[in-house]
Image: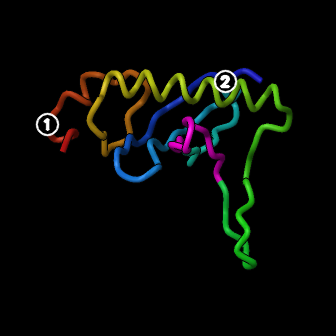
């Protein structure tokens, strides 16, 4: 698996949800609505999911092997921390990784 792009779509500071991220794999598949969540001991990555009629949440897409999950989570958390360092305040609009000029605008910062 070759992760070719990661976009941090939203940074949040309230609640446990810290970011919403999109990942592109092999320049061919995009996975949206990946969440960075603050757990009791560490940040973790939650894959996009949907709630079934019985109330159980099921992942829509997810890594199969533990190695792929580790690679995916490490890449997402690294991108999140990089974006957080660039934009310590929450960013409301969708920003590609490293979009410093757009984030400096008062309209984006809210």
> x, y percentage for residue 12?
37, 45
- Quarter holding the C terminus is top left
Q: Is residue 79 magenta?
A: no
Residue at x-position 66% and y-position 46%: 47
Residue sitting nearer the eye, 3 or 39: 39
> x, y percentage for residue 34?
58, 44
Helix, strand or loop at mark 1:
helix
Q: Is residue 38 magenta?
A: yes
> Is residue 94 positioned above or below 76 on the image?
below
The residue tagged 1 is 106
> x, y percentage for residue 21?
52, 39
- Label at residue 16: none
Q: Is residue 31 left or right of residue 58?
A: left
Q: Residue furthest front?
A: 41
Q: Is residue 78 left or right of residue 9?
A: right
Residue at x-position 63% and y-position 31%: 24
The local crowd at label 2, few if under 14, some if 14 to 19, many if 20 or more residues have their Cα within 10 Å, is some
Numbered range of the magenta stretch: 36-48
Q: Is residue 18 left or right of residue 31?
A: left
- Label at residue 3: 2
Helix, strand or loop at mark 2:
strand
Q: Residue furthest left?
A: 106
């Amino acid at each position: 698996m070759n992760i070719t792009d990661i976009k941090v779509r939203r940074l949040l500071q309230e609640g446990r949800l810290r970011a919403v991220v999109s990942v592109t794999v092999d320049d061919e598949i995009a996975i949206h609505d990946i969440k960075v969540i603050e757990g009791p001991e560490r940040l973790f990555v939650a894959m996009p999911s949907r709630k079934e009629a019985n109330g159980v949440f099921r992942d829509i897409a997810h890594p199969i092997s533990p190695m792929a999950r580790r690679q995916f989570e490490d890449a997402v958390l690294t991108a999140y921390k990089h974006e957080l360092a660039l934009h310590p305040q929450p960013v409301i609009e969708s920003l590609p990784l490293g979009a410093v000029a757009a984030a400096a605008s008062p309209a984006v910062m809210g």
